Image (tube, rainbow, N blue to C red):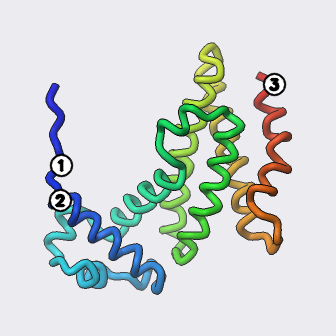
Amino acid sequence: MMETKTDPRVLRTRKLITDAFIKLSQSKSFSDISVKDITEEATINRATFYRHFLDKYDLLEKVVEEKLHLNLGCDKQKDSLSIEETIQTVFLSLTRFKTSVSNISGQEEKETIDAIIKLELVNIFSRKLIDMDAAINADLIVKLAKWLTATVRSMSQDWVESDTAEEPEEYIASLLPFVMCGIEAL
């Protein structure tokens, strides 16, 4: 089967749009950014924008997915990590990610970002748990992946909201043994 390659011009235009959006989000809240602002910053016309994205919410979703994926590292690296290293990597990535998208102020945008994060993390943890023990019941895998997702997201949120001088690496190192006790019970 032949793979189709994406035209480099399409990739460049898409990058222009996402870079413009990211730049604007550094100085404006999401609700204050318009498609017009994005197209002016990217030096493209509105029709070009709409060929790539449905609206600014679609753009937000794609940017969040891309940034989160980059923060979590490539799939090859994740595949070589133990479950403990994966939890630590995900936690550290989430703290960086949450810090980088702190300008997102609207509830709808936050819910979109949160849904994307949950889905991505459940997938990551499900794959990792299957790698650990393929004999585990599929329903249990999903439950455990959701539990790990909720746990890591809550720890990340707690660290971001705390006024502590503790580094995220220290924070996760102190809690990881307790999380691992639950996993090692398998």
How far separated are the C-alphas under marks 1 and 3? Answer: 46 Å
Instruction: State if disc 1 and disc 2 touch (CB < 8 Å).
Output: yes
Residue type pointed to by label 1: Thr
At a point 15% along the width and 61% down the height, the residue shown is: 9
**Residue 185 badge:** 3
Which quadrant holds residue 2? top left
Residue 136 visible to the viewer: yes
Whether residue 64 sits left or right of residue 110 in the image: it is left
Dot 3 crowding, Cα within 10 Å, few <14, some 14–19, many 20+: few
Residue type pointed to by label 3: Ala
At a point 74% along the width and 70% down the height, the residue shown is: 161
Return the residue at label 2. 10
Q: Position of residue 144 (x, y in %)?
A: 68, 33
Indicate whether 94 appears above or below 49.
above
Indicate whether 102 appears above or below 94.
below
The residue tagged with tag 1: helix, strand or loop? Answer: loop
At a point 20% along the width and 67% down the height, the residue shown is: 50
**Residue 6 badge:** 1
